[in-house]
Amino acid sequence: MYPARRLPTHPSDPARDTEETTRAGLSIHELVVISFSNGLADLIAELDRANEDAVRRGAPTQGVLDARLAPHMNSLAEEIGLACTQARLSLARLFGDAPPQPLRTDTYARARDAIETTLADLWECDRNRLEASARHAVSFDLPRGETFDLSGRQYVRDWAVPQFHLHLVAARMILRAQGLRVDQVSPGVHMCAYLRPSARDPGGAV
């Protein structure tokens, strides 16, 4: 356990979560459904490109899924699974539901199915119920024994969003390390909606 000490007050300190600051900023739906969906949509596009590259080279996609940034770190398959779990677990905790069962990601097909299942869970969740969860109490334990008690909004801001993006970025970095170049992929599937017409070809394709 960490030593008991009072850290300096900072913007996310629970003591400073006033009525005004709680109402400000992005909604829970934007932070969870929109942000997580955008990240997962980008990830599935990059996973597809990595699979296409592997097929073209005559190399097994499994080698990419088993790749790690370092021997002691998670594999790509594990990071994809953890990103999906964090997204689905966030909904479960906010709704007071039982934790979801982890999805298998040990093959390309299973990894892709896991992402699609997670996207469906995000898109199909009750938006009104999700927004109402901002002020609900959320409690959860870590394997080391710590227990955290916070509001739904605090949980999303201070835990769910950082944890999801930790695993999303790790997965994308493994893909980069395996040779997927940044210039081979879209700047973000979700960003195509904001692309200036001048950046499109005469036929209207990106």
Image (cartoon, rainbow, N blue to C red):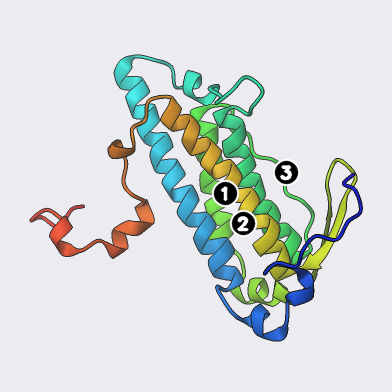
Residue labelled with disc 2: 161
Mark 3 crowdedness (10 Å alpha carbons): few <14, some 14-19, many ≥20: few
- Quadrant in the picture for the N terminus: top right
Left or right for 62, reference 4: left
Residue labelled with disc 3: 101
Q: CA distance from mark 1 to mark 3?
A: 20 Å
| Amino acid carrying mark 2 in the image | Val
Q: Position of residue 95 (x, y in %)?
A: 74, 65
Q: Position of residue 31 (x, y in %)?
A: 57, 65
Number of labels in the image equals: 3
Looking at marks 1 and 3 on the same chain, the residue that comes earlier in the sequence is marked by 3
Q: Residue furthest left?
A: 202
| Residue 124 seen in the figure | no
Secondary structure beneath label 1? helix
In which quarter of the view is residue 5 placed? bottom right
Instruction: Evaluate if marks 1 and 2 touch, with contact meaning CB atoms under 8 Å apart.
Output: yes
What's the mark number on residue 165? 1
Secondary structure beneath label 2? helix
| Amino acid carrying mark 3 in the image | Gln
Mark 2 crowdedness (10 Å alpha carbons): few <14, some 14-19, many ≥20: some
Relative to residue 150, is residue 111 depicted above or below? above
| Amino acid carrying mark 1 in the image | His
What's the mark number on residue 145? none
Identify the residue at horizontal 48%, vertical 51% (top origin): 39
Relative to residue 143, is residue 54 depicted above or below? above
Identify the residue at horizontal 40%, vertical 38% (top origin): 46
